[in-house]
Image: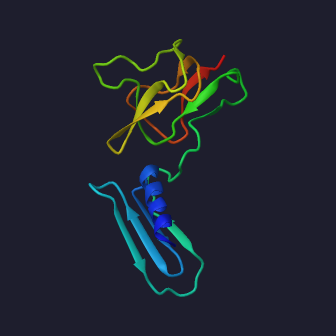
Amino acid sequence: MDIKEIQNLIKFVAKSGASEVKLEMDDIKITIKTGSESDTTIVQQIPMQAQMPQVAAIPTPQDAVVPAKSETVAPADDNSKYITIKSPIIGTFYRKPAPDKPLFVEVGQSIAEGDVLCVIEAMKLFNEIESDFSGKIVKVLVDDSSPVEYDQPLFLVDPS
């Protein structure tokens, strides 16, 4: 495992929200811990007996998954003509940039590609969730200040 692969692994773990990940392979053992003031990475070259590579992640409420897209087509039902915008990360959903500011979007409002729809707070970072297409907000599926999971539906959008 070279330094670029280790750096990519650190970035992956930091974005995923996992608090600790351990990776053991033939001659290397890596432990990545996040959630403190600074990320901690321990890389050790150790002689190990020949064994299959194994990955052990400390269970956390977050899943270590990097989202590919923030929206997918809704299930086939009466909402099948709408696009569902889903949460790309785990965190707390906010409809406003600040308590004294107006909502980013409201039901019935037209949106354009790149418009900020909401923010999701994860590990004290506020991540703006932008639209990848134009359309009209049909329904907001999450209450303000509610916790959201990865891939949880947030908005229904009519793309027409």
Q: Position of residue 156 (x, y in %)?
A: 58, 23
Tell me which residue sits at (51%, 14%) in the image.
107
Q: Residue furthest right?
A: 76
Image check: 51 left or right of 18? right
Q: Residue furthest top?
A: 108
Instruction: Out of 100 and 152, give the one closest to the viewer.
Output: 100
Q: Position of residue 131 (x, y in %)?
A: 53, 28
Q: Quadrant of residue 120?
A: top left
Q: Position of residue 30 (x, y in %)?
A: 43, 71
**How many discs appear?**
0
Name the quarter where the C terminus is drawn: top right
Tell me which residue sits at (69%, 31%) in the image.
75
Q: How is the image coloured?
A: rainbow
Instruction: Out of 93 and 7, give the one closest to the viewer.
Output: 7
Tell me which residue sits at (51%, 27%) in the image.
114
Q: Is residue 17 visible?
A: no
Instruction: Out of 160 and 81, give the one closest to the viewer.
Output: 160
Tell me which residue sits at (37%, 30%) in the image.
145
Q: Position of residue 50 (x, y in %)?
A: 57, 86
Q: Is residue 113 above or below residue 124?
A: above
Q: Is residue 160 visible?
A: yes
Q: Is residue 57 above or below residue 73?
A: below
